[in-house]
Amino acid sequence: MRVLLLYPLFPKSFWSFDKAIELIGCKVTLPPLGLITVAAILPQSWEFRLVDRNAQFETEADWNWADVVIISGMIVQKPDMLHLIREAKERGKLVAAGGPYVTSVPQAAQEAGVDFLILDEGEITLPMFVEALERGETKGVFTAGGEKPDVTSTPIPRFDLLDMKAYLEMSVQFSRGCPFQCEFCDIIVLYGRKPRTKTPAQIIAELQALYDLGWRRSVFMVDDNFIGNKRNVKLLLRELGPWMAKNKYPFRLATEASIDLAQDDELLELMVAANFGAVFLGIETPDTDSLALTQKFQNTRNSLVESVQKINHAGLSVMAGFILGFDGEKAGAGDRIIDFVEATSIPKAMFGLLQALPNTALSKRLQKEGRLLEDSFETSGHQMTLTNFIPTRPPEELAREYVNCFWELYEPSRYLSRVYRHFMGMKPAPHKAPFRMFELVELKAVLTIFWRQGIKRNTRFQFWQQLFSIMRHNSGVFVPYLSNCALIEHFIDYRQVVRQEIEGQLNEYLAGVAKFNQHEVKPVSGFSPAVSERIAS
């Protein structure tokens, strides 16, 4: 069997870092870990070709070569995923689709003509798909029926299928699931509230595979909450640290974790010893009432500011996510987020307007209250999207606060100041990787940063002053400091995109409301008549 694995396009986003990663010749931030895991689970006597459309497009020769096409993606990749299904069917190919999007919302893929839906987690449903093909079947829907696989049997992903030069980072996964119950989160819906982990030997084998393929840059541990099972994560880190030391710290690691990481000194020390350099925290909002309402109680037990500062001072650079649009949220939430980000000096602060994702507790509650918009699950998932439900605050107020957050925090001087304060306060790694000369493309990137930020822009004096201060007072963090400085190349462009996208959607929304208020027969676009009446009132 010859299998063409296709990964659909992502829209431009906060995390795409387009303008920054171009400097070092990369095309995409992270590889499609799900698809290369699928390739490892399927029979190894089969042949595989992987095309990540975010790095390059498939050719007609790829289509002609394939017996079966397998497509996987998230909700935000929906438009290109449906396009690929239709393209495959036009060429007469058997096409299968899986991943979070079709698991949550399979109808659109079925309407596009998909032959096989491989839902839930592939360790259970991919063997069902293989058996169906062996029986000569050409249609099928395969589900796990609520069962969750034991990930200790998951094979090493097929990293060899990747064009590694295209990626800024590689990725591995240690656990699935999260013990918390945040109302808006679909992770607990898809993967459960009991975190399942691989063994330390599995993760080390995956990292060894990357090492053997010559990878020597960052690796992102893509767990939605790396510390969901603290006992098992500590077992991993106690073995990972010595492996890193033995191999002279070939990778700088990053991951996602809950804020209670700050209350576990041993865990912080183990992560730093294993060469973790950054962690993403879902802070969501500094407003305690909103956190309690959305059942994110883990963020209410200790000071968020002190927790972020402790994690940073321990030696981990903090990235964070924030959300606007919670029920009962008071005006000025965007300004309070700006104040929080400045107080904690978080360089990379991502914002989103609240989305009611499929099958979450939030979407079920809003549906009962009659506040979900029509086709809400077919439009959600994108960071630059107005809420897909009727919020308790005026949508125009939310939209303007959202745009203002980006505009203020990613003003170049303000951003560079935060990066400087953040890394000045960060403890350098206790170990030193061997000195490595810059590759030509890296040297060119550094010179480009020096030219743009140190000469061309009006931040030139600030840039050099801060750079020399870092080198003099905290030289151990120089590389991640300069890497974060480089990201302003992306954010300068992205904040313009955010403003244009959100203001365009807002103008369309307001025009629709105005038409409805003039008693035209046609209701506001995207709203049911009952909902339109609520908006008008």
Image (spheres, grey):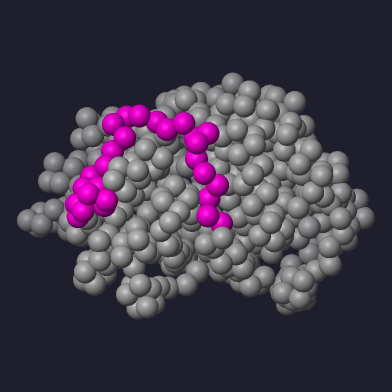
Main SS, magenta residues:
loop
Q: Residue at x 63, y 23 (%)?
A: 231
Q: Quadrant of the C terminus?
A: top left
Q: Viewer-proximal residue, 472 or 404?
A: 472
**Whole-percent x and y of residue 162?**
54, 63
Which quadrant holds residue 126? top left
Q: Viewer-proximal residue, 210 or 19?
A: 210
Q: Is residue 152 magenta?
A: yes
In the picture shown, does residue 183 fall above or below 535?
above
Q: Viewer-proximal residue, 377 or 241?
A: 241
- Report the magenta residues as a range: 132-159
Say whether residue 325 is visible.
Answer: no
Taking the image as shown, residue 172 lies to the left or right of residue 358, namely right
Say whether residue 446 is visible.
Answer: yes
**Whole-percent x and y of residue 326?**
41, 36
Q: Residue at x 22, y 30 (%)?
A: 368
Q: Viewer-proximal residue, 166 or 492?
A: 166
**Whole-percent x and y of residue 417?**
74, 55
Taking the image as shown, residue 144 lies to the left or right of residue 342, namely left
Which quadrant holds residue 181? top left
Q: Is residue 317 magenta?
A: no
Q: Residue at x 34, y 58 (%)?
A: 70
Q: Residue furthest right?
A: 472
Q: Residue furthest top?
A: 301
**Whole-percent x and y of residue 500?**
43, 65
